[in-house]
Amino acid sequence: MLGAVGAKSIDDLFSTIPPAVRSKNRLKIPGGSSEEKTLNQLKDLAAMNIPASAGGTFLGAGSYNHFIPSAVDHLTSRSEWYSAYTPYQPEISQGTLQAIYEFQSYVCNLLGMEIANASMYDGGSALAEAALMATRITKKNEIILSNLIHPRWREITATFTKNRDISLKEMKDDAYGRVDPKRILEAVSSDTAAVIVQSPNFFGCIEDLESIGKVCREKNIMFIVGVAEAMSLGLLKSPGEFGADIVVGEGQSLGLPQSFGGPYLGLFATKQKYMRQMPGRLCGRTTDAEGRSGFVLTLAAREQHIRREKATSNICTNQALCALRSTIYLSLLGKRGFADMAKANFNAGAEFERVLSKSKKIKMPFKHPFFNEVVVELKRDADKVNEKLAKKGITGGLDLSRFYPVSKKMMLLAVTELTTKEQIANLVKGLEG
């Protein structure tokens, strides 16, 4: 097998894995244990976890603590949904197919686009696929993206494009808090396929999508928007209304628990004219030979099907069960309820800003409109502050020095509709102390 793939040895096969993270010794795996002892060990480990509801959590950065109606858990735990596998046989999968169809319809409405796929793995993989899709459509190989896109999303995009003839050009927007459309004009070249931004961006600031979209249209390049906090779509104009060509997002806020980071849900939508370049699968509604309404997989240009190496993507499936949760969640809230939920989040952010602005020890370096998240500058290193907050049962924010060459005293803090005024007051005392 090594010879067939052109590798001389196992080490050669895994040469892309940095030597520093490769184990040189056998794994020290303990021997077997009784069921009773194993269960007790797992219970002890589980007891060490602190739920988001305990003491207050202010850590967002792509994962948010929102209220989820009990009906979402009840309905998605029914036996009909135990297997979320691909419904290859439509005649026996009408329920699953209809759920996917409804999900796609919701995504189109939320993102303001004409067509959406059945979902992606997560927001990061959706963004990477959008970059690849733009290069296929334009036949150009340069992608310009803001460094205020979620750092993990940018890392995933870099991984997807690493072994292709695609150049990623990052704009350094962290010093300004959001993208300046004038800098896009300076960065664009004749090889540029698309500009990618995130709104609200990683710092929580709302981008000027209207001006950015105008620049993209003037330069005849594709405009891609990522949305990490889907709850914002209940209050802000959709990216599609600003002329976006592709919109991707993370659907965790739409009825999915934080769950230590996954599984989550990738949203992907575009204009109908780009449908055949869209990754993943598409569920459609049709009629059978007797004129009865039904649902089928309309488009699935995957590598496992007839497209083979010409497939638009090697993503083989979708997050059907997670997409179902989001569909039920949005159905329960309805259009008005979802807007009210977004307003509750905005109001929590406004209260947070009001309390922070009174502090003489905490600064907010960016004055742009924001949703749910805000950057603060402290008197001490952010990691040290978080250690003290943890001792008080408070989960602090993200130390921004992990991802940006900024002061170690900068922290990204998030609030949601579940954050109470008392929790905010306790946090500010901890930040100042």
Image: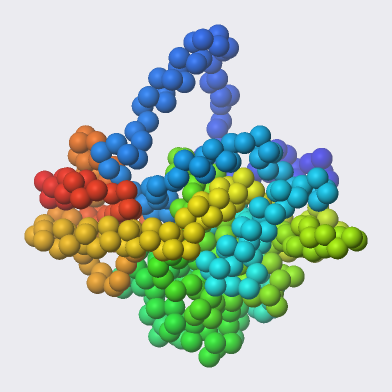
Q: Quadrant of residue 124?
A: bottom right
In the rendered image of this protein, does residue 143 appear above or below residue 380? below
- Residue 95 x, y percent position in the rendering: 71, 48
Split into 4 quadrants, where in the image is the N terminus?
top right
Say which residue appears at 55% left-offset and 20% top-offset. 29
The reply, left or right, for residue 359 in relation to residue 11 is left
Say which residue appears at 37% left-offset and 31% top-offset. 49
Q: Nearer the viewer, residue 149 or 66?
A: 66
Q: Is residue 278 visible?
A: yes
In the rendered image of this protein, does residue 11 appear above or below residue 47? below
In the rendered image of this protein, does residue 343 appear above or below residue 71? below
Q: Nearer the viewer, residue 22 or 363?
A: 363
The reply, left or right, for residue 180 in relation to residue 143 is left
- Residue 201 x, y percent position in the rendering: 40, 66
Q: Residue furthest right?
A: 289
The reply, left or right, for residue 87 in relation to residue 38 is right
Q: Is residue 118 visible?
A: no
Say which residue appears at 45% left-offset and 17% top-offset. 41
Q: Residue furthest bottom?
A: 218
- Residue 11 x, y percent position in the rendering: 66, 39
Say how the picture is coloured. Answer: rainbow
- Residue 91 x, y percent position in the rendering: 83, 49
